[in-house]
Amino acid sequence: MTNTTSPAAATPTPDIARTQGARPAHRWPRLWGRRMWLLLALAAVLLVYRTAVVHYSGISLFFDEAQYWDWSRELQWGYFSKPPVIAGLIAAGTAVFGNGVLGVKIMPMLTYVATAVAMVGLARALWPTSSGVRTGIVAGALFLTSPMTGLLGMFASTDGPLLLCWTLAAWALWRAQVTNRLGLWLLCGVVCGVGMLSKYTMAAFAITALWALWGVHGPKRGLLRLGPWVAIAAALAVLAPNVLWNAEWGFPTLQHTADITTKSSRSGGPVAALVFLVGQIAMLGPVAVIAGLWLHRRVHTGTNEVAGQSQWAASSQMLPPSQWAASTQVASSSQPASSQLSQPEQARTKSTRNSAYYLASVTSYRYLVALSAPLLLIAVAQAFRAGAHVNWAAPAMISLLLLLATRLSLPLVPLSAPRPQAWFWLVLASNLILTGIVLHARDVMGDKLPAKADVLVRMRGWDAAFGQLDPLLNDPRVQGLPIVADKRLLLAQAAYQWRSHQPRIMAWNPTGAHGDHYQLQRSMPNTVGQDVLLLTDAPDPDYILNRFAFKRELGRSMVQVGPGRQITLYLYLARGFVGYDNKTYTQQSGTANERSEDIPFTEQPQGGPSN
């Protein structure tokens, strides 16, 4: 019969094998084995395939990627719109693989492979059994083949390092809460800090962390202990250089982040929120969502057997507080039948019953929900308010894919237990086919494909358009002149596409605005007498050319990249800058006291197209 007294009073401490040190040997299930090597083989095949798509599809860099590359040439602790990790990754990639398109993209692409491996480690921490490792490998395979990875993984973006840091932080937080080890709390804080240096979306992880301090089983709970404060201090220490950079430049990154959420030009409302939710389903894969919902109700509804003693990691924290057992019983009764842990006490071994990892595992499903729900709710609210991009809740996909993996491969049953392998292969195949259709629609339909249906359209044609103008830069009369434009897109692409000329890039900025990185750090100074090359996509850029004494069109290029979409560029030689306004001209030219009716310049600076 089960003893109703507390485990501390009724159950003797089981013998645990010890190492030469003071800590017991942890019998963690093997992480590396045949299944893990198969996962890495899948990752390698998909990486080769995606690099081949980049190489043979004729795409160049998206303008955000071109800007990140430009940042990577001058590493700082921050930039106008993003923290510095993406620039550091690109700098590392180009140092090894060169400044080509693949050199820019390769390191961010590799972060998705690292995230898949980290998901296996997270699953093993949540369910430290051999079956839990298999669940993690299934989750990693789902992640690598998901439309989210298949599309976002083609770009050098901040989402790659963010997803990796989110997964590692989830692992470190779980282990820290279950064991209350100071080193794990420190690691959690460092990873969260690096995540914030990748993308400020990482701040939403704090909501999950607060829940975990009370919601995950551990020897201690809440904030009245050293560990959580060590994590907070470590995160702030890692983030501090970026905060100092922002303070030096007037907090542009924080202001930009606030502007795109509170002052968005996109329209919100119920339709926008619904479109965002449909986008989340598309990121997971429609068949994956159907499989998860179906299997949650149908798969192994009669399975109650818990993984045996040999599969559970031993713990140095034996005989946990009695309230663990009480809350474990309540939590077990609330779990689905396929994941219930409540078993007759006589069927459990003492080492399993008293393992901190076993007791914590009953909260693993709620922990995964806590990893996704807050960020999803915030993103849906933002979509309803003013619209939201589909990737704004990308980290939530990590825990959703792990939850789906628990339906395809149960983590708390013996390895020999049956599982719905047909569903697993169907989900993988459907996601790969869906991603392939999206990526290769242009190859199949050619010019018949509408530009809006081509996900790569904004990366097409830039190399050709700038290539047509490239010979003009070799003219000795214009060599060395700075390139001026009034759009961030053109400045970023000019910096990358004309990188062999090493041009000096300057933003046309008559109002002194700080609306992007180039306006913040590379504005054209209001100094009379400058000669520049003006790059524009406007056929009549008089609002700029009128501020120069001499101007001449050097050439233009036009590239058709899809039905109804083309890139048109104009390059002008502009000599004798007279200042953004007449006051500057008269002051700097020494004609302030002269009166003349022959001033061919406007009294006020003229605005141009917005960025």
Image (spheres, grey):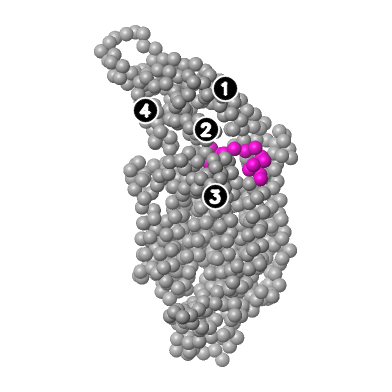
If you read the primary sequence from the N terminus, does the residue marked by circle 3 or circle 4 appear first? 3
The residue under label 1 is: 556
Mark 4: few, some, or many residues within 10 Å (few <14, many ≥20)?
some
If you read the primary sequence from the N terminus, does the residue marked by circle 3 or circle 2 appear first? 3
Which residue is located at x 39 percent, y 66 percent? 228
Which quadrant would residue 429 be assigned to in this image?
bottom right
Region rendered in magenta:
52-65
Residue 107, label in figure = 3
The residue under label 4 is: 525
Which residue is located at x 69 percent, y 75 percent? 416
The N terminus lies in quadrant: bottom right
Q: Is residue 245 left or right of residue 117?
A: left
- Dot 3 and dot 2 residues touching (CB under 8 Å): no
- Dot 3 and dot 4 residues touching (CB under 8 Å): no
The residue under label 2 is: 500
If you read the primary sequence from the N terminus, does the residue marked by circle 2 or circle 4 appear first? 2
How far, Cα to Cα, is label 4 from label 1? Answer: 26 Å
How far, Cα to Cα, is label 1 from label 2? Answer: 20 Å
| Residue that extends furthest to the top in the rendered view of this protein | 597
